[in-house]
Amino acid sequence: MKYNGLLGTFPSEIKLFIGAFVVILSIGFYTGLMFVNETTGAKPAGITENYLGNEEDEDAEVMKFKKSKREILTTVHTHILSMSFIFFLLGGLVWLTKLPKKLKLFLTIEPFLSVLLTFGGIYLLWSGLLWMKYIIMISGTLMTLTFTLSALVILWQLIKKQATT
């Protein structure tokens, strides 16, 4: 079955449907990143403070408390499930683009590893492994980069004209 470049051969109404999905999915994804920036300042210390609290810091602008086990499990559970679904759908579309197979493989498998490291890392950080804050930042950044590249490739291939042969 030939699927490399299949996305570009879809009828315009299907392309519009897929494009609308990718745009709205991207708005949701980047809104989540804005929330992460708001709660952590996109810094290792902010990540630690967000999950472990800052009660000992008398100069803190906003008082934060350590998340309960129930809160941390809810966060990890919902994010792993939802992000897996997001990257499954996006990855399916990536496989229909015209790209080298190795790049497609990276763009579709790496996000699952990043989801596991990011949200598993949050649980491990909460459990006391403080160095996980660096793993969380690295994997979260890589997850964002792969999402962005995947979405851009899909959108580009939806709008570019199909070459006739």
Image (cartoon, rainbow, N blue to C red):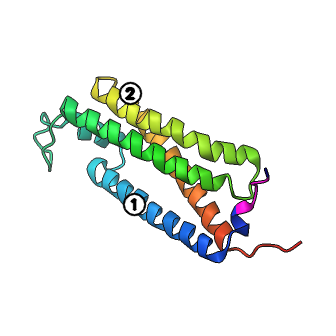
User: Which element type, helix, strand or loop, lies under badge 1?
Assistant: helix
* Residue segment shown in magenta: 2-6
The answer to whether residue 13 is left or right of residue 130 is right
Q: Amino acid at mark 1?
A: Gly
Mark found first going from the N terminus, 2 or 1: 1
Determine the residue positioned at 67% across, 73% down: 11
Q: Amino acid at mark 2?
A: Trp
Q: Quadrant of the C terminus?
A: bottom right
Most common secondary structure along the magenta stretch = loop
Determine the residue positioned at 39% across, 31% down: 121
In the image, is residue 129 above or below residue 53? Answer: above
Determine the residue positioned at 52% across, 48% down: 87
Determine the residue positioned at 64% across, 54% down: 94
Crowdedness near tag 1: few (<14), some (14–19) or many (≥20) residues, C-alpha within 10 Å:
few
In the image, is residue 156 above or below residue 144? Answer: below
* Distance between mark 2 and mark 1 Cα atoms: 29 Å
Q: Nearer the viewer, mark 2 or mark 1?
A: 1
Q: Position of residue 90 (x, y in %)?
A: 55, 53
Res 131 label: 2
- Residue 118, magenta (yes or no): no
Res 28 label: 1
